[in-house]
Image: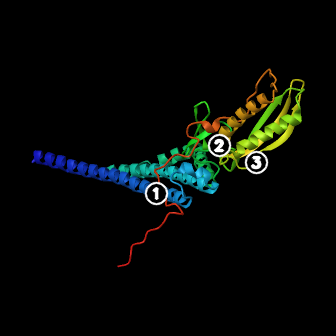
């Protein structure tokens, strides 16, 4: 009789443990399935929005949207970023719910036993959680208000470079030297976005004090105008070049400023080409540029040339050209 009771208790324990393990397994599998379903829905929504933008703009990939209206580019970037943030929120939420259900399945009374302890711990961690909540809310507002997006060149104060990832708490920025910066969203007080709208190339050319300023200015404007009409470059230049004139006078040189309005993604390329052409044009005039004692670099030159500064490529979308002939089946 005694052995029968022992075996009965062992079998009852194994049955109860097996049932709990089955419940835990079902919860884990259900959590993975729910996460997969939600992430799939998010990917589908993001994919449909991006494909719709590309079809409306009649382009095959996101890179070609650079020649399309700015709103389309911003919509694609904002949609992708929101999709990433929502996926992260789904993952965190499902993990928390799954852990609570597993604990409850193993011991239904454990949650009640630790209610007071968890309340005390929650009150203690509440002050620390303020920063986490601040980071999450600030990140969501930045994305929804279109302050930044993946692929943008931004100045966040602590870091300047290309936005690679916008997470729930952290925004990752790759600077021109290749350093990856992790910036807390709650610590971002200002956002300088150099990928929205247009950019301006500013060329300050130093010439000798005895050079003919009028001739040099005319040659600079002629060279910049020729660049603006070049078939290779005119799609990247938004407006005709402007000669702002004599910027400064010193004992060593005269500085003449030339500016050109370009697409934000083409600023550095246009600036390099313009400098090269100006150098050749000045050499043809016989004007020798003065030897300056020091060169001071300022601004964010080259930031847009970091890998990732362009919108990420996507799979091509079949596009029917507007002038393509349409074939109709003959009526029977």
Q: Residue 212 location, x and y as percent? A: 89, 31
Judging depth in this view, the residue of 40 and 291 nearest the camera is 291
Color theme of the render:
rainbow
Mark 2 residue crowding within 10 angstroms, few (<14) / some (14–19) / many (20+): many
Q: Residue furthest bottom?
A: 332
Answer left or right for 175 relative to 280.
left
Judging depth in this view, the residue of 70 and 149 nearest the camera is 70
**Disc 2/disc 3 C-alpha distance (Å):** 15 Å
Circles 2, 3 touching at the beta carbon (< 8 Å): no
At x 71%, y 45%, the residue is 228
Question: Residue 297's quadrant in the figure?
Answer: top right
Of the image marks 3 and 1, the number of the one nearer the N terminus: 3
Q: Residue 53 location, x and y as percent? A: 54, 58
Residue 266, which numbered label?
A: 2
In the picture shown, does residue 256 fall above or below 102? Answer: above
Residue 318, which numbered label?
A: 1
Where does the C terminus fall, quadrant-wise?
bottom left
Residue 240, which numbered label?
A: 3
In the picture shown, does residue 319 fall above or below 332? Answer: above
Question: Residue 167's quadrant in the figure?
Answer: top right
Answer left or right for 211 relative to 204.
right
Asked whether residue 52 is in view, the answer is yes
> Mark 2 or 3, which is nearer the eye?
3
Secondary element at image label 3: loop
Residue 106, which numbered label?
A: none
Of the image marks 2 and 3, the number of the one nearer the N terminus: 3
């Amino acid at each position: 009789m005694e052995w029968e009771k022992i075996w009965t208790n062992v079998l009852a324990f194994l049955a109860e443990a097996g049932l709990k393990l089955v419940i835990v397994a079902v919860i884990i599998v259900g959590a993975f399935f729910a996460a997969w379903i939600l992430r799939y829905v998010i990917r589908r929504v993001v994919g449909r929005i991006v494909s719709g933008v590309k079809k409306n703009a009649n382009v095959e990939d996101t890179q070609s949207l650079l020649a399309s209206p700015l709103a389309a580019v911003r919509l694609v970037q904002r949609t992708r970023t929101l999709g990433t943030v929502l996926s992260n929120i789904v993952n965190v939420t499902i993990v928390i719910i799954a852990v609570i259900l597993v604990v409850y399945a193993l011991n239904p009374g454990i949650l009640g036993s630790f209610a007071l302890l968890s309340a005390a711990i929650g009150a203690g961690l509440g002050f620390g959680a303020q920063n986490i909540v601040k980071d999450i809310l600030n990140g969501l507002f930045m994305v929804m208000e279109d302050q930044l997006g993946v692929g943008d060149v931004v100045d966040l104060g602590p870091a300047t470079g290309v936005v690679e990832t916008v997470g729930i708490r952290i925004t990752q920025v790759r600077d021109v030297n290749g350093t990856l910066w992790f910036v807390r969203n709650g610590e971002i007080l200002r956002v300088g976005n150099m990928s929205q709208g247009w950019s301006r190339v500013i060329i300050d050319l130093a010439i000798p004090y005895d050079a003919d300023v009028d001739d040099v200015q005319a040659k600079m404007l002629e060279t910049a105008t020729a660049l603006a009409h070049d078939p290779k470059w005119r799609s990247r230049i938004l407006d005709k070049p402007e000669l702002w004139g004599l910027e400064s006078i010193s004992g060593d040189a005269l500085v003449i400023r030339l500016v050109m309005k370009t697409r934000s993604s083409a600023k550095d390329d246009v600036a390099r080409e313009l400098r090269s052409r100006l150098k050749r044009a000045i050499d043809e005039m016989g004007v020798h540029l003065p030897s300056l004692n020091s060169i001071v670099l300022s601004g964010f030159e080259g930031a847009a040339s970091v890998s990732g500064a362009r919108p990420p490529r996507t799979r091509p979308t079949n596009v029917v050209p507007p002038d393509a002939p349409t074939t109709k089946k003959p009526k029977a």
